[in-house]
Amino acid sequence: MARSACPVLSSLGPVALDRAGAEPLHRQLYRALRQAVLDGRLRPGERLPPSRTLAADWGLSRNTVVTAYDTLLAEGYVTGQVGAGTFVAASLPDAVPGGGAARDEARRGVGLSARGRALAEAPAIARDRVGRPFALGTPDLAVFPFALWAQLLGRCWRHGGRALATEPDPLGYAPLRAEIAAYLRAVRAVRCEPEQVVIVSGAQQGLALMAQLLLDPGDEAWVEEPGWPGNRAALLGAGARLVPVPVDGEGIDVAAGMARGAGARLALVTPSHQFPLGVTMSLARRLRLLDWAAARDAWIVEDDYDSEFRYAGPPLAALQGLDGAGRVIYVGSFSKVMFPALRLGYVVVPPDLVEPVRAARRHFDGGTSVVPQAALHRFLADGHFASHLRAMRSLYAVKRTAILASVADAFAGFATTEAGEAGMHILLRLPPDCPDHVLAGHAARVGLTTPPLSTYYRAADGGSAGNGLLLGFAAHDPAALDRAVRDLARLAAEMPKG
């Protein structure tokens, strides 16, 4: 059977014509062009080649092409202009017999699961642009030892390339897991052995993985109010029904959680440095949360996203270290200490979850890329991580002091700050007549990234407690921060009041 494929139009792609078939060539050409119009490959207003050109390129008689064009014209798929040529019609016929347009229209109305729709509709915080004050969660990349990191990557390939090229352990690179376990035991008082550490492609994947393993669709899960939208999305992806639980000066209000969601199966919390308010969960609240989990046979997921940067007192022990019942799952990340594109995080799970997690990783993605894990292992084992962390903690302390002084001066008598004892941002509380989302919009137009506090509440307006701006300080030097603070204060003063 002789066929020919002729890519005359780049937007049309190759078209196969069965020259030995029973169907006339002009009908085959007509159907191919019509389908291209319906699929959107030939777009409204696009000019078709002259019939002589198309006939010559495809090895057809000109009458075959003219007949196909005339059929398309008669049915309204194309329009003809004398002396100008043949063009795809701006509007297609209402009735499309068996056409792709009707199928496309039906397909767009279905397809997403209830969880998919919840994820698609969940509020999201846009990623901050690198280089703009006051980007959240962005470390100072100018001082990261990238040359050293490149050397470690190269050394790992030279000495272990063949071994690193094999299929990875779904739980992660064993030497790295051992280093992380030792670090967490020494610095964060986490109870864990290397076998309990799971390497993931960022903390967000770890949260999603735990939600998939521990929750059934419809299960209630506590989330902090306000809280990070990514944490909520991880739970929504598992079909959870979210229960917003208010946060006060001691952290999540366990009593309020019990009143709002007594049957919850899981609580996702940020006890060491609550995001976005910056408070630290009190010991009394931690113990009450653990008691609740034990009584309800529920899980607690501890998101310890930036506790390394603490500026007052010794490092706090993790909530997981207080747990004697195996109810707390600890999640951490290297993105904020090192660099965001590293995409390496870890989850510490109770011993009885190790094999279920291994099976899930094997089915989901097979595990995280081993080469950066091997380099990170050397970065930790050789002392570079501890050295870099000390330097960054000292540097960020200087920047934190500087931005607090700038804000106190520029916003004196107008706004207040809440800084907490850790982290990489401060909270600027605004008066009621200065809506945070309005000021954030003005700031964006002059190159400032100032996420409004109100957007971190599930309620539409966040209430009166949700009026403020989050100001990240880690990525910029004190002089740049001072200029940005004064620009922001000027914008706030220019806003109409009342």
Image: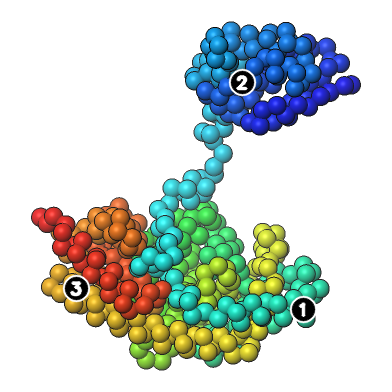
**Which part of the image, by quadrant, shows the N terminus?**
top right
Q: How far across and down, in percent of the image, does residue 475 sit? A: 41, 73
Give the numbered dot on residue 158.
Answer: 1
Residue 417 visible to an observer of this rendering: yes
Say which element carries label 1. helix
Picture residue at 77% right of the left edge, 11% below the top: 61
Q: How far across and down, in percent of the image, does residue 199 sit? A: 63, 73
Q: Quickly name the residue at label 2.
A: 48
Residue 193 visible to an observer of this rendering: no
Looking at the image, residue 36 sits to the left or right of residue 114; the answer is right
Whole-angstrom CA distance, mark 1 to mark 2, is 56 Å
Q: Quickly name the residue at label 3.
A: 410
Picture residue at 72% right of the left edge, 29% below the top: 7
- Amino acid bearing label 3: Ala
164 w.r.t. 57: above or below = below
Whether the residues at callouts 3 and 1 have beta carbons within 8 Å, the answer is: no
184 w.r.t. 278: above or below = below
Of tags 3 and 2, which is closer to the observer?
Answer: 2
Whole-angstrom CA distance, mark 3 to mark 1, is 54 Å
Of tags 1 and 2, which is closer to the observer?
Answer: 2
Picture residue at 61% right of the left edge, 29% below the top: 41
366 w.r.t. 119: above or below = below
- Amino acid bearing label 1: Arg
Say which label, 3 or 1, has the lower sequence index: 1
Q: How far across and down, in percent of the image, does residue 151 sit? A: 66, 80
Say which element carries label 2. strand
